[in-house]
Every structure is written in C-alpha cells, then in structure tokens.
Image (cartoon, grey):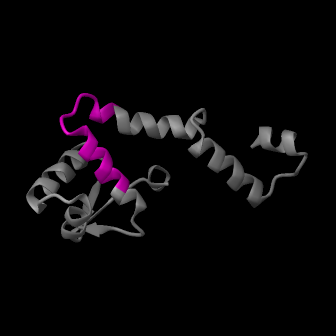
C-alpha cells in the first residue's frame, strides 16, 4: 500500500487499497500470491492425480457459491464416486469444506 501511495502520489483510499490487494494477490512476486501458492502446493506435494485436484480447486474457485457433488462431478467430467474421493482428499488438508451437502473453498482470498 505504501509503495502504491509513493508511486502514484495518491493518498490512501479504498480504490488504492483494492489495487494494492489485487497486485499482492495476482502478481507472481506478491506475498499473498506466494502464500496461496504455498497453501496449495504444500499439501499436494507428490499427490497422485494432482492435475485433477488442481482442476477441482479451480472449479470451486470459479463457482459463484458452494457446489453439490453432482455439479462438481459434471464439471469435472468424472463419476460422483471418484469426485467424492478427490474432495475428501482436499478436505483432509483443509483446502475444501463440506456443509449441508455442498462443497466450497473456505478461504475467500484463496478462492480469488
């Protein structure tokens, strides 16, 4: 935020806060970006089926709200049983939560 203020010569305002947040979150050198990357990379490590797990996270991140198992399986183009197993693996490392029969990413910053 201080960098943005110095570079732009602007005073702190909500727009400048948003710009700083977006840069930190989406830029590959941003601290928030790197933290989110670590949060995802660390639990997956050498996980088998890593590409499907990443795709599943992307599906949940792009969704407007929580999704049911059927909706996720359809978007993933996999059977519900296989999708449930993937969701359970992600749930074990707290990347996905389940509530009232729906699944979602618990961290709004990670979802962004």
Looking at the image, residue 57 sits to the left or right of residue 34; the answer is left
Horizontal and vertical percent position of residue 13? 80, 57
Looking at the image, residue 105 sits to the left or right of residue 23; the answer is left
Q: Residue furthest front?
A: 77
Horizontal and vertical percent position of residue 95? 32, 48
Q: Residue at x 68, y 55 (%)?
A: 18
Q: Which residues are magenta?
A: 42-58
Most foreground residue, 111 or 75: 75
Q: Residue at x 28, y 57 (%)?
A: 97
The vertical placement of 71 against 77, above or below, is below
Q: Is residue 40 visible?
A: yes
Most foreground residue, 30 or 56: 56
The vertical placement of 6 against 100, above or below, is above
Q: Residue at x 74, y 60 (%)?
A: 14
Residue 61 in magenta? no
Q: Residue at x 76, y 53 (%)?
A: 16
Horizontal and vertical percent position of residue 9? 91, 45
């Amino acid at each position: 935020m201080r960098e943005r203020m110095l570079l732009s010569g602007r005073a702190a305002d909500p727009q400048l806060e948003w710009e700083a947040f977006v840069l930190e979150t989406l830029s590959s050198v941003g601290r928030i970006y790197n933290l989110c990357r670590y949060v995802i990379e660390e639990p997956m490590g050498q996980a088998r089926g890593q590409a499907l797990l990443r795709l599943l996270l992307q599906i949940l991140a792009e969704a407007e709200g929580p999704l049911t198992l059927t909706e996720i399986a359809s978007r993933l183009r996999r059977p519900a049983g296989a999708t449930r197993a993937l969701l359970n693996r992600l749930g074990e490392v707290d990347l996905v939560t389940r509530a009232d029969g729906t699944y979602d990413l618990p961290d709004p910053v990670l979802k962004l």
